[in-house]
Image (cartoon, rainbow, N blue to C red):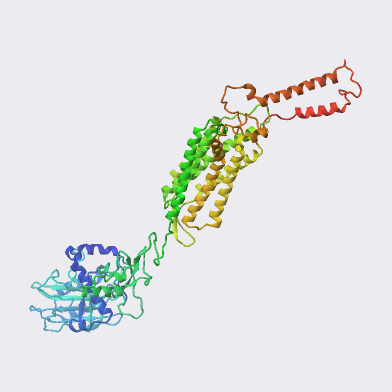
Amino acid sequence: MGGPRRMSSALLLPFLLALPADTANTTGYREELESSLVLVHAVATGATGKLCVSYRNGQLRAPMHVTRWDSARARADLAASLLHQLGLDSADVLEAVSKSLVMGNQNSERAVGARAIPLRADTKVKNATGWQRYGTAEPVPVFYPPLEQVPVTDYPWYESRHKTSQQSFKFMPSPIPDAAMKGWWSFPYFSCDAERWLLSYTVPVHSAREQEGVVSLDIDISNLEINQCEMPTNDNQIYSFHGTHKCHNETTFCEYKPNREVGVRHAGWARGSYACRCRDGYYSTHHPNGFNGSLVEVAYQEYKENSGLENWSEPYQCLQCQPGCETCRGPEPCLATYNWPFRISLLVISVSCAFMTVLLTIYTRHHRRVKVFRVASPVFLSITLLGCACMYMEMAAIFPVLDRYSCIATKWTRHLGFCITYTALLMKTWRVSLTYRVKSAHKLKLTDKQLLQWMAPILLIMLVYLGTWTLSSPPDAEDITDNKGLRFKQCTYNWWDHSLAIGEILFLLWGVRVCYRVRHAESLYNEARLISIAIYNIFTVNSLMIAFHLLILPRAGPDIKYLLGFIRTQLSTSTTVLLVFLPKVLRVVRGTGDTWDRGARARGVPASTSLNGIGLVPDEPPDLYRENDELKEEVQKLAAQIEFMKIVQMEMHNRHLRPRPGGYFSASSPHVTATAVNISQDSTEWPGPV
């Protein structure tokens, strides 16, 4: 016999609203459901000896939705109306009416049992006609209850006329108030005679005097299922049992496990057809696939029968995973551990370096009139130190467990510090390059103010880029795993990072090119060469660190990555500070800060030449002769050449003078030819910048 048609769970709402509030929401209602589950378990396990001997029927106190059998109910109501009109005296009429209820083309219209029972005034059975039909077999007549006796109250479909349906515990409340129903639906019950789970609908037949009889039919509901989990999986389930599982809600959740074994009768009518699976963030070592619901139900029943077992659910609880684990299968950690003493030591060193650069900035400003600082432009030296301090603070930004704000601080300190530091150094080197390439008598003059005007747009572009990045797509922290599979936070890398990295690489390549072009330039205190070494160093360090991160240690842990960041900062920033500032500080400490670089003067570097490419700011009244030594030398050479050319032209092209054959100024003289060639070559050399 096929199951009834499927029903939408949304149709259950009116029925649930119709349940009495003081019944559905009280402990008594829950206890009735638990008693019903005990009965279901007894039937499923075959422990029905006492039930079938003493009562013959076992009724559940579990309301259910009955709309799916409205067609069968309507036929029973029609049969009661016919008997009301035709009377209950004719046996043929009773037989025809009751037999019609078990006939039908569809399962939702056909009952497995039906009966029409006229009663006397003293409620004794006057006549009884009933039929049973299971599956596609022919209807079989049944004869009960016995004639001339009062029907026993054990029948789940019968109630004395002295009780109304509202007073009877056998019938469910009407699912819809004021519904067009003439009878009542019983609660589900197990029939020992039919060995099936049934649901009965009873309609009283009224006359002018009092109740004269009943018409009743039985619906086979053995194909329904009991799902004790919260969410239904289909419409073929008894909704009263939803949420009656015994899983520990904090650590586990209920998963319905229907019994699909072939040959098992009433497979859906079983208690504990579920598994208590661990929630995300919890685990069970011995039960990775969940706890068997049947065992949980048995433990709960023992707890109810023996009130001393307060911790009955402890064996069926899952253990919490280690911190940070969304899912786990054991007590193993999921998060990488941070060696905080080690990280704090590196942070202290980095912050100390940043503090020292600030002190060095103050020191530089204090000694800005000392020649060793003055020739190197104190303004750009201070800007360089501030950029270095900013790069040192990157170690403070990546020190804690990373989040969005620390990632934003990391990007700003790293890239803005890089831009400030090496733009200031390369501006000075670029000025040396321009000055070194000029071969005319006039010296190219670029002041600090002019270089700052060139530097400002570069810093503005970096600020606009970082600001746009922060506002439109701020960098965030993402979970990555190390070589042991442990998770930790790392700042995301996307096309914003890649674009900025490409720009910085191109900027460094341009810096390397500038430094290469001034490799032979002479400067006081050898500063141009030291800055070039610092540029080569930062380019090499960044290239090696990229190789370490991407190729050698791509899945390093958080402490190793923090160490690599510390090494990169020290090799790049600290080396730059030592190369550029340590010689100057040592000279000031030794008292030679105002002494000219004797090595540079010995190599022929004029006293007026500095790294700035312009003369020193004089510390005494201007001396034009001392300021223009090179210019006077060039003018004297040019005047001598002009005077010599004048004499040669006068001797060679004056018709009043007859040169002696073989003389110094004769046309055939090799001295004149060679001198003319040399003068011609000297006169064609371009005195401007290359």
User: Residue 511, image x and y in percent?
Assistant: 59, 41
Reply above or below: 529 against 668.
below
Q: Is residue 180 visible?
A: no
Q: Return the residue nearer the eye: 72 or 675.
A: 675
Q: Tell me the quarter of the picture where residue 89 sits.
A: bottom left
Residue 614 rendering spot, x and y as whole percentages: 60, 29
Quarter-wise, where is residue 471 in the image? Answer: top left
Tell me if residue 80 comes above or below residue 379 in the rendering: below
Q: Tell me which corner region of the image, top left, top right, bottom left or bottom right, holds residue 430.
A: top right
Residue 595, percent from left and from top: 59, 32
Q: Residue 344 vs residue 221: left or right?
A: right
User: Is residue 409 among the parts visible in the rendering?
Assistant: yes
Q: With 490 as the anchor, is 69 left or right in this view? A: left
Residue 638 x %, y %: 73, 24
Question: Disc count in the image?
Answer: 0
Seen as rendered, the residue at the extreme right is 661
Q: Nearer the viewer, residue 253 or 87?
A: 253
Residue projecting furthest to the front: 590
Instruction: Locate the C terminus by quadrant.
Output: top right
**Whether residue 135 is situated above or below residue 413 in the rendered picture:** below
Q: Give the camera-side residue of 400 and 93.
A: 400
Which residue is outermost to the top? 656
Residue at coordinates 65% horizontally, 24% vertically from top-left?
A: 628
Q: Which image quarter holds the N terminus?
A: bottom left
